[in-house]
Amino acid sequence: MNSIRRIKKVLKSKPTIEGTGVYLKRSFGGTYNPQLDPFLLLDDFHSINPDDYIKGFPWHPHRGIETITYVLFGKV
């Protein structure tokens, strides 16, 4: 039962500032999209300069929401 699934839509990321000044690219989330769960969020933030993220994010609960972080290289 092999079938090929076709790509229906490509979503482009948008530059966004989050938290206390962290620059990131938001692929989806934060705006209404009837094709996605309203609690689904995908951000891309990376830099070789730690000062870009030193301010971090203010406290915010993720109660009931699973958070997954992919680290391709480096450290968190």
Image: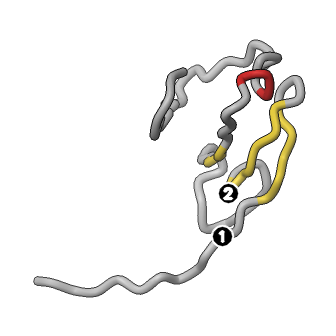
Q: Is residue 49 left or right of residue 9?
A: right
Residue 53 visible? yes
* Mark found first going from the N terminus, 2 or 1: 1
**Snapshot quadrant of residue 35:** bottom right
Above or below residue 3? Residue 37 is: above
Q: Residue at x 66, y 70 (%)?
A: 11
Residue 11 tag number: 1
Above or below residue 51? Residue 4 is: below
Which corner quadrant holds the C terminus?
A: top right
Above or below residue 47? Residue 37 is: below
Identify residue for label 2: 27
User: Which percent across, then down, holds residue 44?
Assistant: 64, 46
Element marked by disc 2? strand
Element marked by disc 1? loop
What's the residue type where badge 1 is placed? Leu
Task: Decide: few, some or many residues near mark 1? Use Cα within 10 Å; few <14, some 14-19, many ≥20.
Answer: few
Q: Is residue 57 left or right of residue 4?
A: right
What's the residue type where badge 2 is placed? Ser
Which corner quadrant holds the N terminus?
A: bottom left
Q: Are marks 2 and 1 in contact (CB under 8 Å)?
A: yes
User: Which percent across, then down, holds residue 8?
Assistant: 53, 83
Q: Residue at x 79, y 58 (%)?
A: 14
User: Which percent across, then down, holds residue 7?
Assistant: 47, 82
Q: CA distance from mark 2 to mark 1?
A: 7 Å
Pick whichever, 1 or 10, lies toward us.
10
Pick whichever, 22 or 4, lies toward us.
22
Task: Decide: few, some or many residues near mark 2? Use Cα within 10 Å; few <14, some 14-19, many ≥20.
Answer: some
Q: Residue at x 54, y 30 (%)?
A: 65
